[in-house]
Amino acid sequence: MTETMQIQEVATRDGFQIEPVHVETADKIALIDALSAAGFPRIEVSSFVSPKAVPALRDAAAVFAGIARRPGTVYVALVPNPKGAERALAAGVDEVNLVASVSETHNCANMGMSPAASLAGFGRIMETLRGSGISTNATVATAFGCPFEGEQPADAVMAQVERYRALGIRGVTLADTTGMANPRQVERLVARALRVVPAEDLTLHFHNTRGLGLANVLAAYQAGARRFDAALGGLGGCPFAPGATGNICTEDLASMAHEMGIATGLDLDALIRLSRDLPRLVGHDGPGQVAKAGRPRDLHPVPRAA
Amino acid sequence: MTETMQIQEVATRDGFQIEPVHVETADKIALIDALSAAGFPRIEVSSFVSPKAVPALRDAAAVFAGIARRPGTVYVALVPNPKGAERALAAGVDEVNLVASVSETHNCANMGMSPAASLAGFGRIMETLRGSGISTNATVATAFGCPFEGEQPADAVMAQVERYRALGIRGVTLADTTGMANPRQVERLVARALRVVPAEDLTLHFHNTRGLGLANVLAAYQAGARRFDAALGGLGGCPFAPGATGNICTEDLASMAHEMGIATGLDLDALIRLSRDLPRLVGHDGPGQVAKAGRPRDLHPVPRAA
């Protein structure tokens, strides 16, 4: 039986949101359509957050209106509050992704409210979405560590996961928001989460801030996780470390999976082409490696003797 | 019992050899002395290769003459042929590292001779070193794939390992010369090599060319490997892919090990300081992540409410 891994693309949300240059709406739509054609099971398209807070994603509704919906791809929007959920509903998203940090300090800094207040809002969002047919996922941010508080107790992470499930939220993402996770911690927390959340509903969201992104994917996969977020070209960043990288890189992860004999359903050649085109959109080179070095199986001509 | 990992520093050899700028001899000596103080069990200082072939390392003898020898650190030189072994002997190296590719094509392109001719030279080198007290290591280059031929048969890799051992060479390095390895391949080949070579004599040399360097370390460690080459700042490169990264990054690997509870004996704060100073020596920024983002435990002040 073929092993499989689901890679979920987040570049147009988690990548573009920190870019200083605004990517044109038409370019976003063309990129998402190309990503759909490359075979992603899920694409996090944009975020219905305040345009003042994240101006780069102010065109979320227009992007959702413009993209072609490929059967087999779930089109997701991040939603921070009940008002965002109403906008997402109007835009016809397939799934909303809610987010709250397990760290009190981080949630206050990032969302302007306590985690408890965020969770109360999730209850209202679930009311708003009732009967809409829209599926739901919720993210535990800073699940592997908070940049202000440090490591977070696994019990607190799991309590938040249980609250999500109690609210009727199906999908759960454990996010290493600022790239603090290590493989052993990942192995332990994934094993624990899988006692509560089935593998088909659990996503791991790793950042490569300290270079461990794909090692953490490997550890999570070995522990039974099968769904991973990643960003084309490794787009994204860390607000605390100028020059540090952000999300793990989609095409590097897909190449690793394919070389390991794990099917992703993705067209890696198409991803490499799309990644190499990203500098045109964002104005800079990215940290992805496979787009620079080529696939391991792309052989080179033998150099002529000097 | 504390788990341990040996990280062996190769920046001044495998890193500097491809830099277009010649690093001053005095700067190399100061860096190696600082690396010694940071606690490395082994440092690959330089290479006694033809100065025409690798001008960046033409000062190998002067570097060996200038460095302070810290008890507990083994100072290694790469040696391509019997003439290089004589120069290494005269320079007072502690250990020589020989290298031959398992790929016929790669060895011809890289060393100008067949692997069989390289092995014959190793026999003469062992004669030269007899009674000198100098220890020996030999590297199987392209062990995880050749950029011209693709994947290499594990049987051929193991045959070369057995020939090294038959020549009386103690240490064996399996090198992923152009970053083609994947974690499953690593797991299989390491398990096989450990049936022939004790863990204390086996080194894994990974490149991060396709972003999998630390995932491959994790797989190798899980399979029982305990010695890893790495380069400060992730120096090095890939001759076939401009912009692609080279060696795995020492401080990123040390950070991963420490976060996993694996002792390395290295002073990570010192490594980060040294890595941040590399642009002064080589004139460019490197791919290392921890030097940019800081250690996971370096917490940030809580931002003030906007």
Image (cartoon, coloured by chain):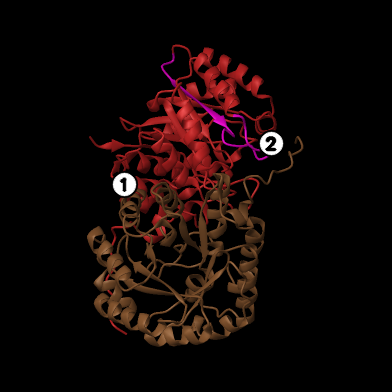
Chain colours: A brown, B red
* Mark linked to residue B260: 1
Chain of the residue under the numbered disc 1 shown in the image:
B
Contact between labelled residues 2 and 1, with CB atoms less than 8 Å apart: no
Report the span colored magenta: B132-153
Amino acid type, mark 1: Met
Q: Quadrant location of residue B290?
A: bottom left
Task: Note whether A96 is above or below A224 in the view shown.
Answer: below
Q: Quadrant location of residue A190?
A: bottom left
Q: Earlier in the sequence, mark 1 or mark 2?
A: 2
**Depth check: B27 or B208 in front?**
B208
Task: Note whether B11 is above or below A229 in the view shown.
Answer: above
Coordinates of residue B153 in the picture (x, y in percent): 61, 29
Magenta highlight: main SS = loop
Please count the marks in the image: 2
Q: Is residue A140 left or right of residue B118?
A: left
* Mark linked to residue B149: 2
Chain of the residue under the numbered disc 2 shown in the image:
B
Residue B303 appears in the rendering: no
Coordinates of residue B277 in the picture (x, y in percent): 42, 54
Q: Is residue B142 magenta?
A: yes
Mark 1 on the same chain as mark 2: yes
- Please tell me which residue is depicted at 63% across the width and 56% down the height of the picture: A268
